[in-house]
Amino acid sequence: MNIYVKIAYTFLGLMIVLNWGMLMRVTFRKIGARMAGRHGVPFRQPWIDLIKNIAVRTTLTHGVMFYLGPVFRFSGAVGLFLFMPILFGKEAWMNFSFEGDLVLILYFQLFGMLGMALGAGEGGQPHSAIGISRGLAQHAAVELPMTMGIIALAIQYQTLSISEIVAAQQGGFLHWSFFTNPVASAAIMLSALGAFGYSPFNLVKAPNEIPIGPPTEYHGTYLGVLMTSGNILGVMETILFMNLVFGGATNWFELIIKSFLIYFYAVFVGMVFPRFRIEQSVAWFFKIPLLLGFIAILMYSF
Amino acid sequence: MVTPIYIVATALGVGFAIGVLNKLGRNFTGGLVLTAIAFMTFISFQWFAGFYSGNQLPEYIFTAGFQPPLSINLLMGPFEAFFSLMVNAIGLVGGIYMFNSLKERGSNAQVVYLILLMGLNVMIMTRDIFNLFVFMEIASISIAGLILLESGTRSMGAGFKYILATSVISSFLLIGVIFAYYFVGSLNIDDLITSNLHLVKGGSIAIFLIMMAVILELKPFPANGWGLDVYEGSDAGLSAVISGASASASLYVLYKLMAIAGPEWNYYISLLGAITFVGSNLLGIKQENTRRMLGYSSIGQLGLLTLIIGFKDILGENTIYIAFGILISHYLAKAGLFWLSGIIKSKGLKGWSVVRKHPFFLFLMGTFVFALIGFPPFPSFFAKWTLVMDLTATGNIAWVVAILFGSMMEAVYLFRWLGYAIKAENDHIEPVKIEWSKIIPVWIAALSLYGIGYYTAQLSEIGSGINFIPFLFVAVLLALDFLPIFIKNTLAIAGMAYYFYTVYPSLDNLRLIFEVIFMVGGILALIAGYAYKGTRSGFYPVAILMYAGLTGIIEANTTLEFFYGWELMTAGSYFLIIRGKRSMPHGLSYMLFSIGGAYALLAAFGMAQVSQISSDLDIINHITYLPQWAYGLLIAGFLTKTASVGLHIWLPGAHGEAESDVSPMVSAILLKAGVFGLVLALIGMGAADNQFSGLAYTLGWVGAITALVGNLMAVFQEDAKRLLAYSSIGQLGYIVFALAIMTHLGWLTAFTYSINHFMYKAILFLTIGAVVLRVGTHDMYKMGGLISRMPFAFIAVLIGIIALSGVPPLSGFAGKWLFYNAVLDKGWYFQGIIVFFAGGIAFLYLWRLIHTIFLGQLKDNHRNVKDISIWFAIPIYILIMGIMVFSVKPEWVLQPLGEILAPYFPNGQVNWVAGSASTALGYWSGTKVFITVVGVFAIAFAFLAISTRKAHKLKQFDIVFSGERPDRPETTHIAWNVFAGFYKAVWPATIPLVEKFWDKVTEMLHDTAGFTRRIYSGNGQAYMLHLVLFVLVTYLVIIGG
């Protein structure tokens, strides 16, 4: 495939993912509102927010790193998209996944997080530092069982290539890792709750009560870039789990259904359970998910 | 050739003459005594030179005109000549040292001193056992006399105890001699030897008593309290003579009489020696009095020598070499230290910090301490090496353990003492008065140690291969220590660069990697030194000493050369580390762990040499004797340098408290010496051989746990440099883990990490060090917001932490990617997970490092700090360029690395196609990922740059926090104004009305006073006017108008 055609397809894919992310998020906002007996925002709200934010004339900056935070975040989100095979067997939608494997994805997730943490830090608002320190602590705890599960899958399929992991799950839903390796899948999906950052693991952002955390430092175009990144990241997280655990997707329809359901799972848990304090959430990941991850690895150790 | 009887004749003659000539004054008699000793020394030297050249045969000297056993005879053989030279030489130099103190005590003391030396000479030379008894008595009484002639109750007590003890010893000897005479009918030692006394019934009791007496004379542990009091209580000069001359003579007497006792005594003699060596050094640890501590050390050294001569049949012809090396080091170093103690005068160990107030005193003291412990280039180093090699080769492992344990104990107290001298506070201590007659002997002892050390190395075939040129460069730098930094730094850099240029073509690729890290890294770290001002006294010799050692281990062809380099490096790095402000305890723990590790290596090399004739370094590739133990010891030795868990406690303090440009030297560079050692050891174990896989497996766990512990501890540090230090422990854990995997991928991971860690840790330590120099604190909570003041430092740290964390697209990711492939390939999942988790934790401390220092609120006292020094920025940005090249073109580094490792691990290599790497499991194109990420980043950056081009730049306090507007950094602290809301409700009640009232009153008082005092104008006319007015006003008031 010609590189220009490739770039065009990739750009198109990015637009689809972005818009699907916005639609998916607003859908869950509405579901949440209805559960709480409110009417909720209209479906067009994310697009309005995005346009409004980018159009805001007054912008303020605390300095260079403050400014680079959203750039890091955006590059992290888009990079994640680029390095991820989106649709199995469709060369046009494999993006740039030939450049690196699962290890690249795992580590590239941190790129945006790091930039974000530093950017908000320059604002000098103490709450940012508190939010980031909580986020990093929780992330370290989430990562352990998740990686154990992922390594178990890598051992099972004897590859670190996401495409090959998806390929191995083709031929009916019983071939999904979810059914062929339920322990590892459970470890991954329980840790995934932490990765999505909904309740009970949302103290990092704590959206409703106190204005803690990095996003509150940003406004205008910065916020627009951050929201765009967030929407892309949301979808990409679901696609990662879809590829690893739920057999990937061979067409856009399948992708949308699967990613919606995976996202729904995180939101559903969030609606039902109240928020953990940070030490509770860290401890939680070190219990059942870690045990499952341990068992998943143990099975391949003998 | 002057016959040795003149030694006795001169001493006696001059002794009697002084009785007549003492009217001519004490200076004259003192000079006469010195001349006599000089003549005695000349006689001994002449004989010694004769024997050394090989032209001289041993000669018997008969007295009184009869043949033995009817009369006494003396023997002058090579040993006698050597020991007599030792006694007379120290007598001469010590006589110069004691010239004034002997003079004060009168001509009698001068005579007694001369007689002491004569007694010792005859003890050495005599072949008649009764004569031996007599002269031992003469020597003992002379020593006691010299002690008693001193003033002070302490010396009185010591002298009295000494007389009592030596009388008891003499009684043993005398009874033994009587028995021996009864059985053999001769007092001649040669007759006693040929008579096979030990086979005669009842003869063994004679032997026992004689041997006990000569062993007791050596002050064996624990029956040596009397000897210790002498060391503590007597004049420092006399202690030096007792330690150097009297003990040496006694040792030779023991050696001489062992021929009578027969070989069955050898074991017991060695055993008593070992007990004394270990016991004395153990007790030495508890000593707080310098002289007593040195006494323990002396007795310990004599124990070691006793052990060695007990092994003379096993050690064979090497006995002389070994005993010579240990004895001469002890003889010179201990004399030097006793002499120094007489100058310093401080009884306590801490008082020795005064040595820093005198140029070169620290150098002298350090020389003696290192010589006693057995560091290169001193004779004891080569002797101890040969001793351990030979004992191991003959299977005497337990003895080796005892020797190394005793040496370790000795190192504990000697290095603690040296640490006090280097670091203890010395403001309140007055400099001492130095007499030339006292300092010259110390210099003679120190310089002789270096000279004889070099000579000792040349004596052995393996030692003569050692390259002393780097060490010579150290000496040159020491001599030029008075020059300003700029010249010395340039010289050091030029020297290292030139040396690297000459040496690199001779190295294989594996060694070249480490040589580049050591030498190029060293040069980069030295560049930062230009930022310092003044002379930076003592820095350059020790820094170059460390680099000399580092290049020494790389260039080593033999195990001895490797060990030589290793010890030089340890010595140099010890001094570098202890230079830090609060580094005293850390320097000590570093030294002790290093010595422990070095002894493990020594024992392992000894085992490797068993059943292999060669001493090439390659022998560690084919260890057959107790190979599990040997490799285990090698690994353990090297793990002390990589600071693996359990052996890591020295590192945080040592690296954290070191100077700003020393931290990268000892972290980014020095730790790789341990890695290099591990690489050699693991290559030796061999990849294919499964015999050692258990050892590698254990090592893997050690590495994994080290990674976790190091990183976890780093998270909780408040001190930036300690944070980085713990991070180094963790990073070295990764490397150890990856090496233990023992596959191509594992080693590729380890080497990638080694190279990366060198670069980013050097960047981070240099940058943080440079920041510390500007802000004057390591504590992160005292910093903040420095990004606005130090943008260059911030960028450097940012790149450093991204590389360290392994986030793509920087080079750290290469290590992570290889790591996953290696772990999955090997199947070490759990260890791999632990290491991976450690990597996750690394984020926490990295964020903490950059955030608390550079982000958040700028502190008021840092509002005017400048960016880091350009001299630090240069090496930092060179290293950043290195990271960037590695990131953009990882194949430039990884592909050659793979080829270097292929001979050791041919299977499972990484495939490279057009810059894309792939393994059986995964794939990665470093360059493409870099371009992709940078491309996306650039687009986002451009978009945001354009859309926010008119953004208003906020000031530091343009934030709202807890509903308040902070205006100073501390007002963003949670505790600041914690009841702000309540205050807003009740503030009228808090107005300090009373305070304001009194303020007003005070103000008015001051105004009045100020106005009133204007009348005191200082003008004479005005004062006259006052008088007149005073009289006038008084008149008006009293008398009225």
Image (cartoon, coloured by chain):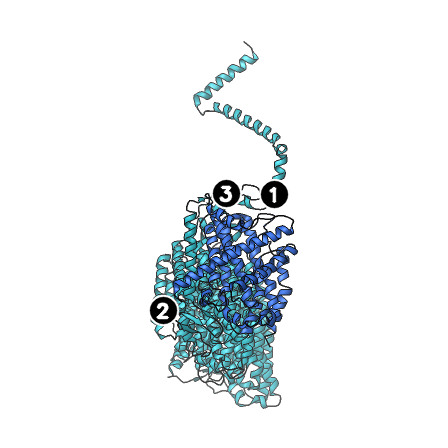
Chain colours: A blue, B cyan
Give the x, y percent position of residue B759: 43, 63
Q: Chain of mark 2?
A: B
Disc 2 crowd rating (10 Å Cα; few below 14, some 14-19, many 20+) is some
State the quadrant of the C terminus of chain B.
Answer: top right
Q: Which mark identifies residue B958?
A: 3
User: Which amino acid, mark 1?
Assistant: Val
Across and down, in percent, residue B654 comes to 51, 62
At horizontal 56% and vertical 46% (from top left) the residue drawn is B973
Image mark 1: chain = B
Q: Secondary structure at mark 2?
A: helix
Q: Amino acid at mark 2?
A: Phe
Q: Report which residue position mark 1 lands on.
A: B978
| Secondary-structure class at tag 3 | loop
Q: Is residue B213 left or right of residue B498?
A: right
Question: Of B882 and A2, which appears nearest the observer?
Answer: A2
- Whichever of callouts 3 and 1 sits on the residue coming sooner in the sequence is 3
Q: Secondary structure at mark 1?
A: loop
Identify which residue is drawn at 36% across, 61% down: B480
Side (left or right) of B192 relative to A63: right
CB under 8 Å between callouts 2 and 1? no
First of labels 2, 3 by sequence position: 2
